[in-house]
Amino acid sequence: MAKLYLVPTPIGNLDDITLRAVEVLRTVDLILAEDTRTTSFLLRHLGIEKPLRSHHKFNEHATAQFFTETVAAGQNVALVSDAGTPGISDPGFLLVRTCVEQGIEVETLPGATALIPALVNSGFPCDRFCFEGFLPQKKGRTKHLERCREEERTMIFYESPYRVVKCLEQFAEFFGEERPISVSRELTKKFEETVRGTIGEVLAHFREHEPKGEFVLVVAGKPTKKKRNETEEDD
């Protein structure tokens, strides 16, 4: 029986792709790509030639059923995003749900995603955390941040370089300038950088240094009553 494979791709360094991912891409009948140009570059790097079709956020509602039927008809299909694991702030959820609802097997390969390296690198607790992805750009953004204000787990956000300063300004407003934060950019790439400190300190840094690249912002959770008491005793 044919399957839908979800295949993570490197978030920067092309050498981070797994051997299993390469084997799946070599053996499937069709590859669905968020951007066929980006995926074509990766496939050329790997020496793989396969048919490519577009599956992105602008057409996934219209194509999910069609590609589900493609797998049902006997073709093994791989879904990739431009970088990282499909479905994590990228297209994939609708197609997976449609396949699952229709009894078609879905196999997800482990692999690259930006949130885990940024989380572990932050030095914040990793045993319990919540992934917030991209905040709403307009409607619902304030209410979302109000809910996050009371979150005691480590929080992980994605942001574009064009909105990082605004995002940090809002974090300072809702979480307080003294809340610890770790901001990673260009993970696995040549100019990878992580800036740690309070929200106020990191905001000052990126006001002075133009943000470039893709960003992951890891924010410490709200201190619990127990932690606050321990801090007060230490003082």
Image (spheres, helix red, strand yellow):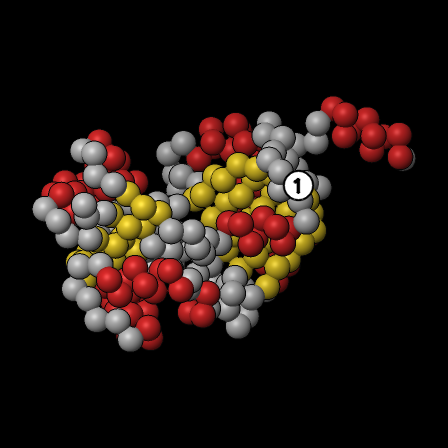
With 151 as the anchor, is 179 left or right in this view? right
Quarter of image, res 206: bottom right
The residue type indicated by label 1 comes to Pro
Q: Quadrant of residue 205?
A: bottom right
Which quadrant would the N terminus be assigned to in this image? top left
Q: In the rendering, at what x and y percent does residue 17 appear?
A: 41, 64
Asked whether 72 or 62 is in front, the reply is 72
**Which residue is label 1 attached to?**
125
Residue 11 or residue 147, whichever sits in front: 11
Give SS at disc 1: loop
In the foreground, 43 or 179: 43
Residue under the image location 59 percent in, 64 percent down: 193
Quarter of the image where one finds residue 134? top left
Q: Is residue 209 above or below residue 234?
A: below
- As displayed, is residue 137 above or below residue 182? above
* Residue at 18%, 62% in the rendered image: 52
Q: Residue at x 78, y 29 (%)?
A: 228
In the image as oriented, which residue stretches furthest toward the left?
73
Image x and y of residue 53, in percent: 17, 58
Of residues 33 and 105, the one nearer the viewer is 105
How far across and how far down the image is residue 176, in percent?
Answer: 66, 37
Q: Quadrant of the C terminus?
A: top right
Compared across the picture, whether 194 is left or right of 42 comes to right
Residue depicted at x 51% and y 65%: 188
Q: Is residue 209 visible?
A: yes
